[in-house]
């Protein structure tokens, strides 16, 4: 699964200690590729330009919410020397993760895994109690340009309930 060609030009601190960046993902169209960092953990990371990665501070791990969000994880693992965590049930991976995780597992940065099947059956959201209860969700919500936040259409969801 090739990573998108896009490179994020900047990161933005959306709330204290929570960073966000996005790229245009030519594989699916639009600015769908969102990545985050919190408490030393990269979540579903895309590539970053220049010294933007340094703005995120010391990094200890990469956590993927699903196998389709591998993006730049393997390249960053080699560059940074940090482990990659992936849901235990994820099958389609380009490289073996360092650790597998499941519902309720504690992860680096104090993240907690919550099983949330959306567009796939192995997806996990990540709860960050340290960042005030921020929940990082994979492929559960969509937002068109300046439109409201909405659920992914139910026909694309594994289990809408």
Image: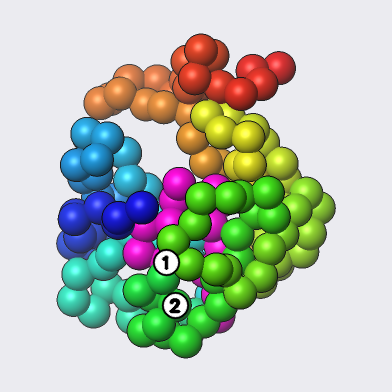
The residue under the point 49% across, 19% down is 156
Front in this rendered view, residue 88 or 43: 88
Residue 122 lies, in percent from the top left, at 63, 42
Q: Is residue 13 magenta?
A: no
Where disc 1 sits, the SS reads helix
Q: Can residue 15 be seen in this view?
A: no
For marks 2 and 1, give the CA distance. Answer: 6 Å
Indicate the colouring scheme. rainbow
Q: Can residue 145 be seen in this view?
A: yes
Residue 48 lies, in percent from the top left, at 26, 67
Q: Which mark is residue 77?
A: 2
Q: Count neighbours of disc 2 (C-alpha within 10 A) and say few if under 14, some if 14 to 19, many if 20 or more.
A: some
Residue 103 lies, in percent from the top left, at 78, 49
Quarter where residue 29 is shown: top left
The residue under the point 47% across, 87% down is 81
Classify 6 as above or below 85. Answer: above
* Horizontal arrangement in the rendering, residue 105 relative to residue 144 (left or right): right
Specify start and end residues of the magenta stretch as a single range.
60-73
Quarter where residue 6 is shown: bottom left
The residue under the point 44% across, 50% down is 69
Q: Is residue 69 magenta?
A: yes
| Tag 1 residue | 73
Classify 111 as above or below 137. Answer: below
Q: Are marks 2 and 1 in contact (CB under 8 Å)?
A: yes
């Amino acid at each position: 699964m090739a990573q998108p060609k896009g490179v994020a030009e900047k990161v933005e601190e959306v709330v204290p200690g929570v960073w966000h960046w996005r790229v245009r993902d030519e594989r699916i169209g639009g600015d769908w590729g969102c990545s985050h960092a919190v408490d030393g953990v990269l979540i579903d990371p895309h590539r970053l330009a220049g010294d933007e990665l340094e703005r995120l501070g010391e990094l200890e791990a990469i956590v993927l919410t699903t196998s389709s969000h591998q993006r730049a994880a393997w390249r960053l693992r080699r560059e940074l020397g940090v482990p990659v965590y992936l849901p235990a049930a994820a099958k389609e991976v380009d490289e073996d993760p360092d650790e597998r995780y499941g519902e309720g597992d504690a992860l680096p940065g104090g993240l907690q895994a919550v099983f949330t099947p959306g567009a796939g059956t192995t997806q996990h959201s990540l709860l960050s109690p340290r960042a005030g209860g921020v929940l990082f969700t994979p492929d559960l919500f969509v937002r068109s340009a300046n439109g409201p936040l909405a659920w992914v259409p139910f026909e694309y969801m594994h289990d809408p309930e």
